[in-house]
Amino acid sequence: MLAPIFQTFMDRLREAADCEALKDALSGVVDAFGLNGFAYASALELTPDPAPYLTTYPAHWVTRYLDERYHEIDPVVLKARRCTAPFHWDCQTPSPAASEDERRFLGDAEEFGIECGLTFPIHDGRRHPALLSFAYRRRQGPLSANIEKHLHLAALYFHVHAGPNWRRPAKGSAAPKPLACNGSRAASAAPTSLKSLTFLNTLSYAIYGTQNVSSARTPCHKLWPLRCAIG
């Protein structure tokens, strides 16, 4: 059942030429699994400016997040900077060490329908850490291990395509910019650096069972177990 979903996602992602197409490709996975939305952020640096982002979270929440400068205290972002393993989060169960500001942030997120989620930190050696979070309703209960595996693959594959096209906000700019793709080149263009190529080959091996990034399409029922080591 999951194989056609992931195959469609990969096909749409390879054909995506701008940010809206990237968003639509990943939204197909979100909708198929009954999730509540996603948020991708690249270049998670400790700077005064928000990281470039692409999200389907409610527009009013995104505006509040930026206006309140929540990126400075967001516990999901802070954890993704320092760890590499996927982690779950729930706005009703903050860390015992969470500050009052962090608890206020989680309470605000809950009011906008962002209840809990699964976040995949991505440390690929090419740039500062990135993350992809998938939000879901608490009533859905825990995600199955099989769905989590496919979401992990989706996160890595999405990063390979979207990551090279991010643009940081202009220095000193009061208005952060969302992730912006260069429309003059396809988002699926192969990275040129050795580290990028190695990362893509590793991901290709996990998805297709081959390290040839230009290999022909392989049906997703032949997905190999996730074995990507992001270093």
Image (cartoon, helix red, strand yellow):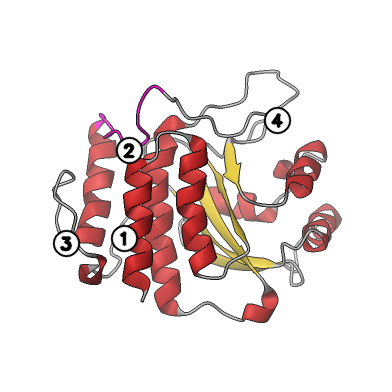
Earlier-in-chain disc, 1 versus 3 = 1
Q: Does 115 appear above or below 130?
A: below
Report the magenta residues as a range. Answer: 184-193
Q: Is residue 193 left or right of residue 164?
A: left
Q: Amino acid at mark 3?
A: Gly
Q: Secondary structure at mark 3?
A: loop
Residue to which mark 4 is pinned: 48
Q: Is residue 12 left or right of residue 220?
A: right
* Residue at (77% x, 39% y) in the render: 69
Few, some or many C-alpha atoms within 10 Å of disc 1 (few <14, some 14-19, many ≥20)?
some
Q: Secondary structure at mark 1?
A: helix
Few, some or many C-alpha atoms within 10 Å of disc 3 (few <14, some 14-19, many ≥20)?
some
* Residue at (30% x, 58% y) in the render: 228
Dividing the picture into quarters, in which one does residue 149 lie? bottom left
Q: Amino acid at mark 1?
A: Gln
Residue to which mark 3 is pinned: 209
Q: Amino acid at mark 4?
A: Pro
Residue 173: x %, y % from top left: 71, 20
Q: Please, what is the dominant secondary structure of the magenta stretch?
A: loop
In terms of depth relative to the viewer, which is nearer, 14 or 205?
A: 14
Residue 186: x %, y % from top left: 35, 31
